[in-house]
Amino acid sequence: MILLSNDIVPLSGYRITEQIYSGSKTLVYRAVRKQDQKIVVIKLMRNEYPTIDEIAQFRNQYTITKNLNLQGIVKPLNLENYRNAYALVMEDFSGISLKDWTKRKEKNIVSLGEFFQIAIQIVSILEELHRHRIIHKDIKPANVLINPNTLEIKLIDFSIATLLPREVQFITNPNVLEGTLAYISPEQTGRMNRGIDYRSDFYSLGVTFFELLSGELPFNTNDPMELVHAHIAKQPDKFKIKHSKSTNNEEIPEVLCDIVMKLMSKNAEDRYQSTYGLKYDIEICHQHWKQTGNIPFLKLAVKDISDRFLIPEKLYGRQEEVANLLAAFDRVTQGKTEMVLVAGFSGIGKTAVVNEVHKPIVRQRSYFIQGKFDQFQREIPLSALVQAFSELIRQILIETEAEIQHWKLKILAALGQQAQIINDVIPVLEQIIGKQPKCAELSGNAAQNRFNLLFKRFIQVFLSKEHPLVIFLDDLQWADTTSLKFIQLLMNQNNVENKKSFIANFESQENILIPNFESENLSGDRTQNLEISEGSLLLIGAYRDNEVFQAHPLYFTIKEIEKTGASINHIILQPLNQNNLNDLIADTLFCKQDVAIPLTQMVFAKTKGNPFFAIQFLTSLHKDNIIKFNYNLACWEYNLPQLQILTLTDDVVEFMALQIKKLPKITQDVLKFAACIGNEFDLKTLAIINEKSAVDTASEIWKALYEGLVLPQTEAYKLFQNASSSVDYDSQKSQNLPLNTSLWPRYKFIHDRVQQAAYSLIPQDQKKQIHLRIGQLLLKNISVAEREEKIFQLVNQFNIAVEIITDRTQRDELAEMNLVAGRKAIASTAYIAATKYLSTAIELLANDCWETKYELSIALYETAAEAAYLSGNFQKMEELIQVVLAQAKTLLEKVKVYEIKIQADGAQNKALASVNTSLSFLKLLGVEFPHQPNQLDVQLAMAEITSNLAGKQIQELINLPEMKQPELLAAMRILSSTAPVAYQVAAELFLLICLKQINLSIKYGNSSLSAYAYVVYAVMLCGVLKDFESGYQFGRLALNLLAQSGAKEIKARVMQGFYSLIEIWHKHVKKTLKPLLESYSAGLETGDLEFAAYCLMYYSSFSYWIGKQLTELDGEIENYNHAISQIKQERPLNWSNIYRQIVLNLLHNTENPSSLVGIAYDENIMLPIHLEAKDGVGLLYLYLGKLHLCYLFEQYFLAVENATLAEKYLDGGIGQLVVPIFYFYDSLARLAIYPQISEIEQQQNLEKVAANQEKMNQWAHYAPMNYLHKFYLVEAERHRVVGEYLQAMDDYDQAIAYAKEYEYLNEEALAEELAAKFYLGINKQRIAQTYMTDAYYNYLKWGALAKVEDLQKRYSQLLAQIIQQEKLNIQINDRTTNSIRISHSIASSNETVFSTSISDMLDLASVIKASQAISRKIEMEQLLSALIAVVIENAGASKCAMILNESHRFKLTVAAVGCSSISGSISTDFPAIDLDSSRDVPITLINYVKRTNQIFVSDNVKTANFLLNDSYIVQEEPKSILCIPIISQGNLLGILYLENNLTMAAFTRDRIGIINLLSTQAAISLENAILYKNLEKYSQTLEEKVNQRTQELNDKNQCLQKIIQELHSTQTQLIQSEKMSSLGQMVAGIAHEINNPINFIHGNITHISEYMENLLDLISTYQQECLNPSTLIKQKTENFDLDFMVDDLPKILDSMKLGSSRIRNIILGLRNFSRLDESEMKPVNIHQGIDSTLMLLQHRLKEKSGRSEIEVIKEYGSLPEITCYAGQLNQVFMNILNNAIDALEELFSISHTSLLDQHRNHTENVQPYLTQASLGDTKGKLTQFQRQIRIVTQLTNSNKLMIQISDNGCGMTRQVRQKIFDPFFTTKSVGNGIGLGLSISYQIVVDKHKGQLTCYSVPGKGTDFIIEIPIR
């Protein structure tokens, strides 16, 4: 006994005494019923807030069993209301569970006597249940109660039981595992693709019997995956039963074991087919055992008779069609979008074919939703799509709260503040996202565009590549026009092969078809990371092809979709042939095919092979006893003569009507009502129409449900299961049902022919009356809030009966309802349907409606006119408008229809008529315009604005009052409607309209439409008047007013105008990119598609001009252009395609990169189109793009030609970024051709550039971040062409610096390239190389690969090092890639499935476990053993073989064979024999897979004809086989063979997927094992190879030593070369930096001297003429010492001139010496090079520190210019002269030391008398020594140049002289030299110049170096 819980809530009328059981979901108590003191058992729900499914299951226990008078079940007494659910009161049986009872037994085993007693009782109970058509579905010991004393048995827990003959598996939860995992049947696992029927109870009973007899479960494992695998593929070990011993040591007889094994057969057909046959066998065994104590061998199932008429559910003759459908789904999983159309006659099996595949599709990885168009509800727009997505929302509603919240965030992130639009269409969505803010009302195409966008976004929420969305729309022949258009749009939108993701949040990348950008209406916490798929949509449609003719709307829709190139697959279903039909009938009757032929012929003649008709016909024959079961002969039979005389219609509708007439009258009536509702209906609506309670209505329709004419759509139907026998109870309980309105049970007719048949039973003269009654009942019984939701359903009922509605009040009410329906249809863009509703409403109006129902009349006519315009019926629109104009009482009441007329004229390309209409009406409103507007009118209007603004600040206009006068507001609306049309007719009128709106706003206050007028005016100020400051203020005013007013309908155009035409003159262009995308999103949401397209076009062009990375940009532009094409905006698409082609030209090298001809744009095709359309903007973009490309690729004259053409169309770019870009490249192109044109043309070009620069300077003043670097670059080029090099240098650097600072990567690269060309032009190659290298890498960063390649070709000498390095990298990368490239043919994917289903968790656990097991093995046999074990376990196989191809020569070896024993263990052998000699596998199949490299699977081996003669197949007779090739690096590594000899169709698609996944790991592990095996083999010969290799290394060692010596020499050169290169760059840089200021100083000294002389002369003249100066002048003269200044000033200037000349000479020397960077031999002045070197060494030659000046004696001969490497010779001179100076310095040090020593020795004894004079004498001797360097040049007779450099230094010894040219030899101290100078000099003279360098030296005498160079 369990103690009573203290927290139990009391149940009225009962006293709880004890707790019996406490589980996770239920509590069970024993109690006393107070009214009669009877002891009862009470079962309660533990959850205080249970789900609808929990309630249904709990209540199901009561409703199924309450009226059963069966001894073998626990009798339910009552179902009480308890908290939010129920309490089930049952009789107290005083029993315990069979599970608890067996625990008391030794080893948990019962005796045979007890077993027979228990088993017979359980089977008897099941027999009674099955007789009552109840399937328990959860047989297990815990659900069997036993009285311990009497062993009486009773069955409990019918929570998941069903009354239906065959359980329907709902798509809401396709993988659900109902029941208890250890006891469920294979088909209950969801992995056998079979329905669940009464035979599932037999399997669970077999498991129960097994446990009773053996004391354990047949499959002992805690691993759920292994348990599921065991149920599917493993045979239970009957020896566990046979060898178990009961308490009496009884051995279990063999026959009893066989009974258990038969019950547990994997296929339901192999089990017992009836409880009668099972009970008979058990009772016979019991009798034998009682009589003899033993049971002899018995033939089982001799009395097993199946008396159920069950027509197989499988499809006949549809294998190919199903395969095609599955193949389409497989393609969709790769990210594609496809459409499959299934066509055929009604009843042909279209829906059945799709249903055959939708279950595995959903079970594996996707959502499957379906909707059906209804022939009786064809006016409801988007009915099937709404139905499908409503079903999807209902699926989400049964998930956890966390999952619902997740979906809510995703949906709101996609829909933003426009979500209510979808709420209105799919009302059930509101239960997830809640009520949303009301959206702004839009009209015309804007509304349709907005709805299309939002619905597509809504659909895309559910798309993903891993889980594709599958939408099935049935009966497309009845689809409304709106649905067809949306289907077309959906397919066109998804028809892109290479879609890129857009982002819903700029912080993360997302995958979405129509971009959803973070914007104001996606603000707050709604902006979530929304991942949207790339395609991933399969749209399946079914239609009756005999009803779709060439003029049918569906036919046109299909053709339009095909034109776009969308993937459409057509599946045409034909009637079954006689063979197919005969197979179906033979399987149904369990007879041979020849026996079924006569019946087949009769059925075929009647039904013409129509599957639905045939099945219904056979069912009818069985009900009429023409087909019946003969119990005497134990077989099915049919009465052919009776069938032949039967007169039945061959019309399926009439036939089904006859079948319905056989149902009870109340069922017929309720079916008629249901048919009036539609193909699908819910119980609540049906109960209202039936005028009875939901319980009574459920009771009346139950018979149709049971007969299969109506199918339940949700589990909620079980709440009313068997309701017909519970009227009294249910009438009391129905009001307390905890049932949400949206979760009422829903039903559908099994086929539309059944619906038609039910509807046909209504007499024709009563149909209208019935529809009227239905409408009245619905109107009366549904709430006002629900009425709008069901307005279409409601109005349709009334409209059918409109002819019999005569009451004026009712007709007016119906007219109002039709108005509501019409407006809702317009909101859903169903314009044709709206027209019908509104036309009906107008017909309902009385003749005097304009007097009696004025408001209703004008509303109807206005709305009908709008619907007629939107549906394209302009004639009807005109008629309705004229009525309104004639009847409207006020001018303001005509505004709406005038707006419609203006828009309609514009839509018909009647722009002029539209404008005239507008102007006429505006005149009535008091707003007038000139008859023929001109520029003067525009100027006057602008002057009026200026006048009205007097005394006002622009920013203060935001504070203007709100415009309230109705006439003015109407005028503003008409002006806004007219503006777009006016722009097409006359630009001046467009400007006047905008200016008029501004003036009206300034005078009378702002309206919501004022913002657009302000932004247009701002564009005029910036683009035309160049008043950038005022323009920017008006632009900001427009944005602020837009935010304040919330006028979403103009948001896109205001934002586009500001960010593309105003912001660029004040802020960096990159700051406009994000707002432009936000504007695009706003345009889509408000239907302003034109401006949405402009936003994307500007985004693409701006991104290009600011230098966005081209590879990334190409993808963006491609996707944005696709988006533009989808919204049908051709002109901006053409413009944007120009930029896409420019990008492509730069990305890919083309023959002519300046020609815009490619996949995105073809100028040859488009140029005539632009010209014909007078598309100035397009022509400007085209010629500007060509100008840009021509300049980049140095086609300068062609660039100028395109600039001239582009300039003609500059008016088309007013205010745009392309204007300054044009002037930029125009200037550059003209300067590029400057040297090659005449002087006159040069002057003209300079003047043109100056004018351009004046504009650029103005733009740079306001927005330096966009234009300053452009200005400087043009200035640099201008200074270059006129020879002002110093200024050019500075400007190049300024341009580069500013471009870098403002992140214009493309123009930074351009500036660096032009600077490089400049320095190259003035022979500064090293500097040019630096700039060109920077340009190269920046172009590379930009992604302009074509430009990079062009640079490589043109400037290879500057980029040689880079090009060489890239070639080396390519070679290395190729080798690396080839060494690691490993591919497997078996694809695998890691899927993340957000599901809590047991099956998914089992699969995941299995894959992880198996993969780990395989990956750990490297030894071959261990690996094969592990691999076979996990494959058998996961595949459901009984045998597995691995065939290897280790040599890759197609010689296959059977390496391992594994088998699963009865006990479940797996044994593996390793035969290692050739395939041809093996008897373990089907050789024919293995060879087939070897040749095709394709997976082969067969659910039934007998159907594989080519295997029927294979000896292995004939002998072993496997039922299912699977063969998978394992391929690595394109080679067949092995073949995996699996079979199951117990069941057919064992290898399902998900099982194959898992094995496929495992085989990928197997391929890797097998390769490793083979490598490991080969490694062992190679190790045996390793020693021999090592010895051989050692000898080879010794041989090569000598070569290596030689190479090292060469490297040593090379290193020497490299070090010195790098040193001198750096020195050259440093010297050149210093010279450049100093030269500019010193030239300035030196050049101005002359002028100062002239000025000074003039001033002094003036002062002298003044002194002569002014003899009496004032006191102040005298005082100043004395203070300044004027005479001294006059004398000293010329001297100062002379010294300054001398100093500056000295500096210039030094710079000249530096520049000459810096010619080290010249890589080519050139004629030079040798003396100039020597002098430059001496100039640099001047500081060492001067006198200093007591040392005398080194005298340089030049003896220059007469030399011509010598062709040589000047820079390198300068290096030689520098090295020799430096060494000469060092030698002289060393001599001075030695002499100084020697003289001091002599003096010290002479005076050490007379130190006290030493004087300063004596020390001076010593120094004098040192200074008397004259240090000299002599330089002699001359030409020898042998035509050589000789240069001799001599010094009188200390000289050198012979030993030193022999080593002076060796690398790294030096006599200097550490830190004063590295010993490379003379070595390098020797190589320069000897190697480079083919000359001689000789040294002569005598110690103490000096050294001579002689250079001899041949003259070239």
Image (spheres, rainbow, N blue to C red):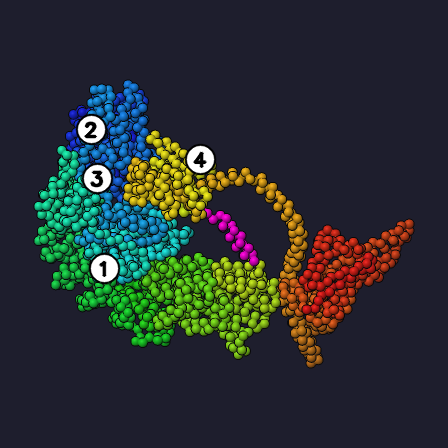
- SS of the residue under disc 2: helix
Determine the residue positioned at 78% across, 62% down: 1904
Q: Identify the mark nearer the N-term, 4 or 1.
A: 1
Q: Identify the mark nearer the N-term, 2 or 1.
A: 2
> Does residue 518 lie above or below 743 as drawn?
below
The type of residue carrying mark 4 is: Gln
Q: Does residue 715 appear left or right of residue 1111 in this picture?
A: left
Residue on which disc 4 sits? 1422
Q: Identify the mark nearer the N-term, 2 or 4.
A: 2
Question: Does the segment drawn in magenta span residue 1600?
Answer: no
Crowd around label 1: few <14 · some 14–19 · many ≥20 (10 Å): some
Q: Identify the mark nearer the N-term, 4 or 3.
A: 3
User: Are the residues tagged 2 and 3 within 8 Å (C-beta)?
Assistant: no
Cα–Cα gap, marks 2 and 1: 61 Å
Cα–Cα gap, marks 4 and 1: 65 Å
Q: Position of residue 736 (x, y in %)?
A: 20, 38
User: Quarter holding the C terminus?
Assistant: bottom right
Residue on which disc 2 sits? 279
Q: Position of residue 1594 (x, y in %)?
A: 64, 45
Q: Which mark is residue 553?
A: 1
Q: Position of residue 222 (x, y in %)?
A: 35, 32
- SS of the residue under disc 4: helix
Residue 97 lies in quadrant: top left
Q: How many marks?
A: 4
User: Quarter holding the N terminus?
Assistant: top left
| Viewer-proximal residue among 457 and 894 | 457
User: Which stretch appears magenta?
Assistant: 1364-1383
The type of residue carrying mark 3 is: Arg
Residue on which disc 3 sits? 166
User: Are the residues tagged 1 and 3 within 8 Å (C-beta)?
Assistant: no
User: Are the residues tagged 2 and 1 within 8 Å (C-beta)?
Assistant: no
Determine the residue positioned at 64% across, 69% down: 1639
